[in-house]
Amino acid sequence: MAIQTGTMKSILSDAYKGSALYGALTTTAPGSSSGTEVSGGSPAYARKSLTWGSSSSGVVSATAVVFDVPTGTTVVGFQVHSAVTAGTYYDGVGITSQTFASQGTYTITPTYTQS
């Protein structure tokens, strides 16, 4: 059964944002299991805390997050976790890949849509 109301979609997107607390970049595509997380660099790569806004008809976005990315890394995915290190992998998605010839940053505005 497809969800018919914006109210129920927002309830479910609120549950998502309540669990998806930290964002991460990956060098392999995430899916039903976690992708390979970026590591290294100076300044060092680290997961970022996600600050989610209000849900509207099942759509919710977090504020933009900026990740430090080390030289020689190709970023291909974004995923969410329950903790700043280790924790539970909850979800992930492929993103437009970007290769870093030198140390740089990658900015992403996470958005979840409950269909």
Image (cartoon, rainbow, N blue to C red):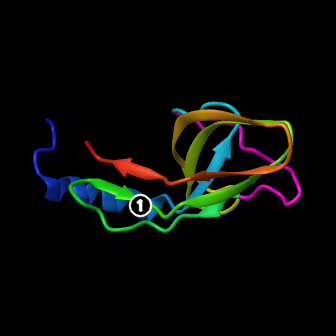
**Residue 42 drawn in magenta:** yes
Direction from residue 53 to residue 109 in the image, left or right: right
Q: Quadrant of the C terminus?
A: top left
Q: Residue at x 54, y 33 (%)?
A: 94
Direction from residue 22 to residue 6 in the image, left or right: left
Tell me the amino acid under the disc marked 1: Lys
- Please determine whether, in this image, residue 8 is positioned above or below residue 31: below
Secondary structure mostly seen in magenta is loop
Q: Quadrant of the N terminus?
A: top left
Magenta region: which residues?
32-46
Direction from residue 64 to residue 26 in the image, left or right: right
Direction from residue 55 to residue 45 in the image, left or right: right
In the rendered image, which quarter is residue 98 located in?
A: top right
Residue 8 lies, in percent from the top left, at 17, 55
**Residue 44 drawn in magenta:** yes
Residue 30 appears anywhere in the view: no
Secondary structure beneath label 1: helix
Label 1: how many Cα within 10 Å (few below 14, some 14–19, many 20+) = many
Q: Residue at x 30, y 53 (%)?
A: 59
Q: Disc 1 marks which residue?
A: 17
